[in-house]
Image (cartoon, grey):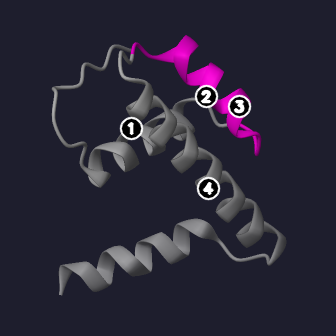
Amino acid sequence: MSIRCIMGRIKNMFIRNVGNDLIDQYPDKFSLDYEKNKELINELIDIQSKTVRNKIAGFITHEIKKREKLHTRKISYDAISDKKKRKRRR
């Protein structure tokens, strides 16, 4: 997977989309450790910018923590995200 970033401001949706795609493609590889996630992103995709790599790693770490927290509370993450999507459509 090759992702090239254009110079300039990085938008949050770009970070989220790339992070969610990586989590969906490699669900068992990412962990709660930011440093490991950062190195894994270097291996999986070609990002030339450290800032973008770090933002994606931070987002993935945050998302994994959030999903584990919801999992321990026995709440389906998919149900929550579906509900948010339905609210946005209105």
- The location of residue 82, given as percent across then percent down, is 42, 72
Q: Label 1, label 2: how many angstroms apart (C-alpha)?
A: 13 Å
Q: Are marks 3 and 2 in contact (CB under 8 Å)?
A: yes
Q: Label 3, label 4: how many angstroms apart (C-alpha)?
A: 13 Å
- The location of residue 86, given as percent across then percent down, is 31, 80
Q: Please state, as top left, top right, bottom left or bottom right, where the C terminus lies in the image.
A: bottom left
Residue 41 among magenta residues: yes
Which residue is found at the position 44% from the left and 25% from the top? Answer: 50
Q: Which residue is mark 3?
A: 35
Q: Is residue 88 above or below residue 39?
A: below
**Which residue type does callout 2 highlight?**
Lys
Q: Which residue is mark 2?
A: 38
Which-is-in-front pick, marks 3 and 4? 3
Q: Which residues are magenta?
A: 28-46
**Which residue type does callout 4 highlight?**
His
Which-is-in-front pick, marks 3 and 1? 3
The foreground one among 20 and 9 is 9
The foreground one among 27 and 13 is 13
Say whether disc 3 or disc 4 marks the residue closer to the N-terminus: 3
Q: Are marks 3 and 4 in contact (CB under 8 Å)?
A: no
Instruction: Count neighbours of disc 4 (C-alpha within 10 A) and say few if under 14, some if 14 to 19, many if 20 or more.
Output: some
Which residue is found at the position 39% from the left and 37% from the top? Answer: 18
Q: Which residue is mark 1?
A: 18
Q: Can I make out residue 62 in this image?
A: yes
Label 4 secondary element: helix
Which residue is found at the position 33% from the left and 74% from the top? Answer: 85
Instruction: Count neighbours of disc 3 (C-alpha within 10 A) and say few if under 14, some if 14 to 19, many if 20 or more.
Output: few
Q: Are marks 4 and 1 in contact (CB under 8 Å)?
A: no
